[in-house]
Amino acid sequence: MEALQNFLTKMGEDACFRQAYYANPNAVLAQSGLQGIYADAVMNQDSSALKALVGDDTIPFLLVNHGNKL
């Protein structure tokens, strides 16, 4: 859960990290230590799963659609 929280925080704060994710989401997820259900929830933009995995629905997070380029 901590890796997911760190990942979501970094996505919201670090533009270079977001660009790297847009360029190669699988590599960035792996480098972030996200695997299995955590990586799946991010890749599928599954807000319900992300809320459940984070464990606190009061923590804001950013869902990123890796199919859209900035």
Image (tube, rainbow, N blue to C red):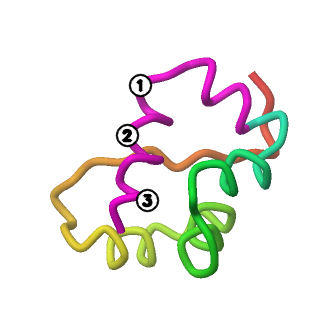
Are discs 2 and 1 less than 8 Å apart at CB?
yes
Q: Are marks 2 and 3 in contact (CB under 8 Å)?
A: no
**Drawn side of residue 18 relative to residue 19, left or right:** left
* Residue at (83, 42) in percent of width and height: 24
Q: Secondary structure beneath disc 3?
A: helix
Q: Name the residue tied to disc 3.
A: 4
What is the distance, in whole Å, between disc 1 and disc 3 at their CAs? 14 Å
Q: Secondary structure at mark 1?
A: helix
**Up/down of 63 relative to 13, above or below:** below
* Contact, mark 1 vs mark 3 (Cβ under 8 Å): no
- Give the amino acid type for the residue marked by disc 1 in the picture: Glu
Q: Name the quadrant of the C terminus.
A: top right
Q: Nearer the viewer, residue 34 or 8?
A: 34
Check residue 12 for magenta coloring: yes
Q: Which residue is mark 1?
A: 13
Q: Which mark is residue 9?
A: 2
Looking at marks 1 and 3 on the same chain, the residue that comes earlier in the sequence is marked by 3
Q: What is the x, y in percent for residue 43?
A: 68, 62
Along the viewing direction, whichever of 30 and 67 lies nearer the viewer: 30
Looking at the rendering, the stretch of residues picked out in magenta corresponds to 1-21
